[in-house]
Amino acid sequence: MKNSEKKDAAKMGKEPVPGKGLLGRRALLRGALLSAGAAAASVGIAQADDSIGANAPEWMKTPGRSFSPYGTPSKWQEKVQRTIANPPGRPGTGVSRTPLQRLEGTITPAGLHFERHHNGVPDIDPSQHELLIHGMVKRPLAFSTDVLARYPMETHIRFIECSGNSGGYNQAQPPQATSGELNGLLSGSEWTGVRLATLLNEAGVAPGAKWVIAEGADAAAMSRSIPLEKCMDDAMIALFQNGEAIRPEQGYPMRLLLPGFEGNMNVKWIRRLNVTDVPVDARDETSHYTELMPGGKARQFMFPMGAKSLILKPSFGMNLQGPGWYEISGLAWSGAGRIAKVEVSKDAGKTWELAALNAPVLPMALTRFRLPWDWKGQPSTLMSRATDETGDVQPSRADWVAQFVPGQGYHFNGIQAWGIEADGTVKNVYA
Ligand SMILES: Nc1nc2c(c(=O)[nH]1)N[C@H]1C(S)=C(S)[C@@H](COP(=O)(O)O)O[C@H]1N2
Ligand SMILES: [Mo]
């Protein structure tokens, strides 16, 4: 805000600081409508007594810089980065997490999409790459990248979540870290590609086929067994992410997209689909991505991700700046369909209020929820609870933890809580 605007706002008795005047209950409730009005009003104030003159900011006094062939974020946003976690000596193995709490809306910029690689990002020449469909099919087919690009395409907004996401919540003590550091193995994108059913039908699936073994062209040759039913339903060979060719980190030139299913099954750099009658018990569905339960049994093939939500504003690292109006906002999603409702509690789960869901509410996509909050300065515990259209309700952390052996962290979808202290400090708490 310009100095002159501040002066004018002060003259009018309006101090444009959240919670002190302009930002009030009505502004938060009416949302976009009212804030659009407020913005227009302050432009008017500035123009009334101040065009480009002595008080103009530096950047209005000289022409701006030239064009760029591919844009990058503002240098003022350079702290908005993925956080990388990889073991020493194995740079290509591990994860980088999306800084969820620093983003808005529901689409993750491609450069901030989380990454999970089992042996690095391969540098694939698309002209040398083929997708092979073979096994229990009438005629095996190989699709070059160019040939695949000629098929009819579809576009869908979907989330991908690693089943290891939020695994830190199985710890005895609540980890003190940002929401992105805890939950950032989650991203949302607009994906465009060819329906897998189109390609499987062309190859002709043989009677008795029940599974498809998907294999990636990375140095891990990562493989998973996928039920044929899913492959014939909404599975996609994705070629584009948010309008541009899929990024190398996300599977360039093509990846398998299985809406709602655990991240691991969305095989990147996909090169082979072997149609079979049985699952293969691949390394990644036995040593990893199974959930050990008390008594020694393991839950295997837990495909869809459960209903889940997170409060991102406020959250760890974003302490409240004194009493007043705040918007509680976050993300909700479910691997089983659309989010039906998100409830928010400000008192550790004693009472719950319905949050507003920002349209469009899409199946297997991130949904933004919002609720205004007049914080009087009292210690508070904020929680959110998602329910999806199938009636699946996000469980309490205690109920979730009780299903598994201590330390089991896959498929965590328990309710999370932020403790707000009287001085505005935000801490991760178990409530
Ligand atoms: N070929 C291959 N596919 C892969 C992986 C991999 O290492 N190699 N990682 C899997 C895991 S565990 C997850 S959670 C998702 C992550 O997708 P992203 O890196 O695009 O976020 O890709 C899956 N597909
Ligand atoms: Mo994963």
Image (spheres, grey):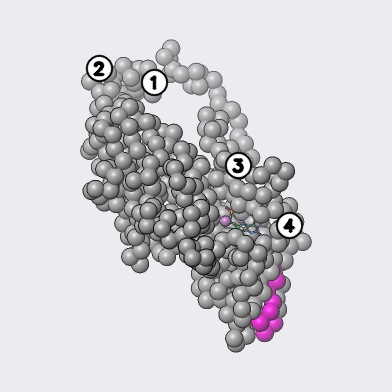
Q: Where is residue 364 in the image (x, y as percent from the top left)?
A: 44, 61
Residue plotted at (30% across, 29% down): 422
- Circles 2, 4 touching at the beta carbon (< 8 Å): no
Q: Considering depth in this image, is 176 or 20 the residue closer to the camera? A: 176
Mark earlier in primary sequence (1, 4): 1
Between residue 97 and residue 415, name the one nearer to us. Answer: 415
- Element under disc 3: strand
Q: Mark 4 points at which residue?
A: 219
The residue mark sitting in front, 3 or 2, is 3
Number of labelled discs? 4
> In the current view of this chain or complex, which residue is farthest to the right?
128
Q: How far apart are marks 3 and 4 (CA)?
A: 20 Å
Kindly give the residue lying farthest to the front in the view shown.
Answer: 295
Residue drawn at (73%, 57%), measured in percent from left and top? 219
Reading the image, the residue beneath label 2 is: 11
Snapshot quadrant of residue 337? bottom left
Which residue is tagged 3? 84
Membership of 136 in magenta stretch = yes
Q: Distance between the residues labelled 1 and 4?
A: 54 Å
Q: Distance between the residues labelled 1 and 2?
A: 14 Å
**Residue 295 screen position, x and y as percent:** 49, 65
Which secondary structure lies at badge 4? loop
Could you say which quadrant of the image residue 375 lies in?
A: top left
Magenta extent = 131-139
| Label 2 to label 4: alpha-carbon separation | 65 Å
Q: Distance of mark 3 from mark 2, alpha carbons? A: 48 Å
Q: Does the residue labelled 3 lie within 8 Å of ligand 1?
A: no
Residue, far bottom = 207
